[in-house]
Image (cartoon, rainbow, N blue to C red):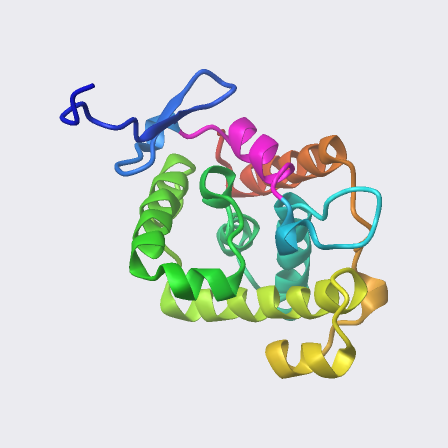
Amino acid sequence: MSGSKSMRAWQRMLSGRRLDLLDPSPLDVEIADIAHGLARVARWNGQTKGDHAFSVAQHSLIVEQIFCRTNPDASSEAMALALLHDAPEYVIGDMISPFKSVVGGGYKAVELRLEAAIHIRFGLPPHPTKELKVMIKKADTVAAFFEATELAGFSVTEAQKFFGVPRGITRDMLELKPMPALDAQARFLERFHALEADRGVTA
């Protein structure tokens, strides 16, 4: 077989779209595909307690909730960017941080291209501003602390070492019990469409 034949670099989505992983087009991005995929991607490589995987979709909802609580004056656009902060993972999966550092820049380049395509599809800036990115990352880190201690077997001391001490957010504020995929998918879509309505945008 000839080695000159080009390798497939696209993924077929359930919507029928073909998304080019190396040169993604906003025209091939659908929120239904994102919600479906994120609800079936497991955080922590699936090493979490409960009858269901703790999905990236549920994590995204929690991060956006924390972001809203810690930034009460945030715009609907900023909230949407928080909700979609891990959206590229519907294609590339949730790679744990230690492995990301091993893989290096190639992974990040693909992730950034996917992020831009997703954001543009929904009328958002290709990437968050530096300041907003920091704010979303803080919410993400708080979520990771509670996920680590409640679901992934970390001690509080160990989690504080990696994620710091959460401030202004307590365990009882967050729904950490892993949801069935269909529930996480539906809730992610519901929140996305609510934010779109607030922004006056039709996806």
Taking 116 as reference, is 3 left or right? left
Q: Quadrant of the N terminus?
A: top left
Taking 1 as reference, is 19 left or right? right
Q: Is residue 86 above or below residue 41?
A: below
Taking 167 as reference, is 6 left or right? left
Q: Is residue 150 above or below residue 16?
A: below
Residue 68 x/y as whole percent: 64, 61
Residue 118 x/y as whole percent: 40, 40
Q: Residue furthest front?
A: 1
Q: Tell me where residue 165 sits by quadrant.
A: bottom right
Residue 36 lies within the magenta run: yes
Along the line of sight, which residue is nearer the eye, 39 or 107? 107
Residue 101 x/y as whole percent: 41, 66
Which range of residues does the magenta coloring cover?
A: 29-41
Q: Residue furthest top?
A: 16
Residue at 43% over, 37% down: 122
Q: Is residue 141 above or below residue 33?
A: below
